[in-house]
Amino acid sequence: MELVGRMLDGSIAYGDRQRLEPVPSAASIRQDEKMDRLENVPLFEACTRRQLRALAQIADCFDAPTGTVLIRAGEPGEEFFLIVEGTARVHVSARKRLRLRPGDFFGEMSLIDGEPRSATVVAETPLRLLVISRKNFSALFEKVPDMSRTLLTTLSRRVRQAERALDLSRRA
Ligand code: CMP
């Protein structure tokens, strides 16, 4: 299980600022603030107010210092991440890195296909994240089928970027 998952189920301690681990947000985000953030994310634009409220309840807020490895390529994936504040780097290949910004999400691929994580994702700045577990993500997906359109668009864009990166590294 991944870092955040192990923190959520209590099998590892958190809160030690010396370690590069996400910690539950100290400035706990109010439910209505979570909803404001969530309703401005394109992925969730098809959600009703009721679904957004449910989403705000199931999404856990975490802070991660710069340098935190949130996802490691090749490991099994258990969570979906949405950036509330800060930026993260996706290490698509040895030569290609992409920046994700507030409103962007990551970690969806392993939750969709059950395969290991496709890339490593690292906090480029201090990050505030909303984290949704695999189980809740699947339930949400079933309740809001329109989410699949945005997910597919994002996935297609990511495949193209990955192929371009592969192409460039083959030519180098
Ligand atoms: P997942 O494979 O679960 O874990 C790594 C994540 O990095 C992946 O989901 C995507 O969210 C993200 N990712 C992988 N490849 C790209 C890419 N080419 N562009 C942007 N994000 C990516």
Image (cartoon, rainbow, N blue to C red):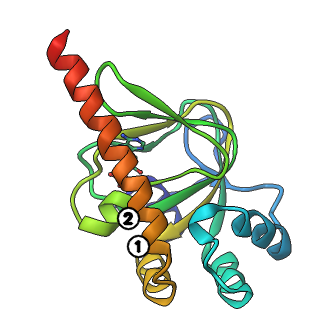
Q: Quadrant of residue 100?
A: top right
Residue occupying the point 58% across, 57% down: 82
**Disc 1 from disc 2: Cα separation:** 5 Å
Label pair 1/2, CB-CB below 8 angstroms = yes
State the residue lying farthest toward the left. 170
Q: Is residue 23 above or below residue 66?
A: below
Residue 107 visible to the viewer: no
Instruction: Please indicate whether residue 160 sits to the left or right of residue 150 in the image.
Output: left
Q: Secondary structure at mark 1?
A: helix
Look at the numbered disc 2 and say if its residue's Cβ is closer than 8 Å to ligand 1: no
Question: Quick one: 109 or 171, which is closer to the camera?
Answer: 171
Residue occupying the point 38% across, 64% down: 78
Could you tell me the amino acid type at mark 1? Arg
Q: Position of residue 48 (x, y in %)?
A: 68, 86
Residue occupying the point 80% across, 68% down: 36
Q: Is residue 127 above or below residue 36?
A: above
Q: Is residue 1 above or below residue 102?
A: below
State the residue lying farthest toward the top. 172
Q: Position of residue 126 (x, y in %)?
A: 68, 36
Q: Which residue is mark 2?
A: 78
Q: Residues within 10 Å of mark 1 (few under 14, many from 20)?
A: many
